[in-house]
Amino acid sequence: MSYQNIKTEVTGAVGIATLNRPEALNALNTPLLNELADALEAWDRDDKVRCMIVTGSDRAFAAGADIKEMQPKTYSQMYRENLYGDQFDRIARVKKPIIAAVAGHALGGGCELALVCDFIIAAETAKFGQPEITLGIMPGLGGSQRLTRIIGKSKAMDMCLTGRMMDAAEAESCGLAARVVPAELLMDEALKAAGKIAAQSSPAAQMVKEAVNRALETSLAEGLHFERRLFHAMFATADQKEGMAAFAEKRKPAFKGE
Ligand code: CO8
């Protein structure tokens, strides 16, 4: 598949999608988001890929949704086209784990793209923000919802109301970023984490993703019930037999994703 706005490669069992609109600091426009959703969905269907990374450049993960594309739109166009919304929904439905490897600016839709991935590994240079308010608008791709569930009301209000940026250290301390690493090690660390995930049972990794995401959507009692049902279901997989047999036999498991 050849793309114009992203670069893709598969290393081992890890699919890497690199946003590639350097002239616009990877601003997310419709063609880029279509390509990204297409690529991630294709890897979701491909048994050879078991984990994915979305990344940008040293300067910007993504400096937001494309302001120039949005500027002339009317209410009715935004509503009818659901601009960017369909692609974000498609990405949110990807079942395999996705790591966001973030360096530089992750602003507005860029921060929201990192949030729709499963966890964020940030370079020390990363800067997160929801500056929509400074454009006379508000977040529209999860910045008032996913962000609030992750960093809490007070910090989400601060980010969304003032439009200020958060550095990598603050992002890690409030749980937005899972880890912070030196910029030059960002892809090494992301690949190491992705490789580790890809080496596990693929059904187990996908069910973990589903269960953790469910925690953001439901009550504790419902979430615990859902987790328990998935846990029981794992005993129908060959990978559960293999993982536990390997432990008992003091050897490495060879998971087949079955
Ligand atoms: N959209 C379009 N173009 C952009 C964007 C963007 N979000 N960000 C940067 N660019 C372009 C600039 O226009 C510039 O292009 P040109 O050279 O043609 O003028 C080029 O990228 C480089 O940018 P700068 O010269 O500004 O680079 P600096 O290093 O000086 O500044 C910043 C970097 C601070 C990141 C600055 O570019 C900036 O403030 N960008 C905008 C950040 C922003 O406001 N992001 C939020 C956008 S709104 C949004 O994301 C809403 C999402 C919800 C959509 C909901 C739909 C349902």
Image (cartoon, rainbow, N blue to C red):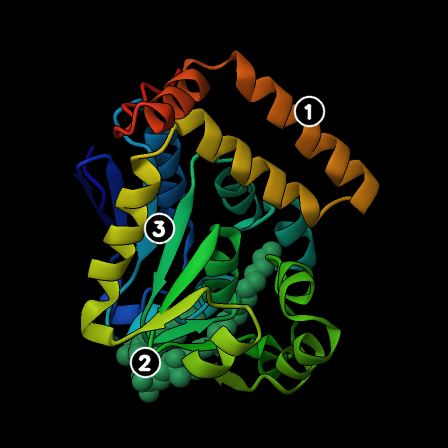
Image point (69%, 58%), residue name: 75
Residue 94 at what x, y percent from top left?
47, 35
Image point (45%, 35%), residue name: 205
The N terminus, quarter of image: top left
Q: Nearer the viewer, mark 2 or mark 1?
A: 1
Name the amino acid type tagged 2: Thr
Q: Which mark is residue 46?
A: none
Distance in Å between CA atoms under marks 1 and 3: 38 Å
Distance in Å between CA atoms under marks 2 and 1: 41 Å
Q: Which residue is mark 1?
A: 229
Name the amino acid type tagged 1: Arg
Name the amino acid type tagged 3: Leu
Q: Nearer the viewer, mark 1 or mark 3?
A: 1
Quarter of the picture for ligand 1?
Answer: bottom left
Q: Which residue is mark 2?
A: 125
Distance in Å between CA atoms under marks 3 and 2: 24 Å
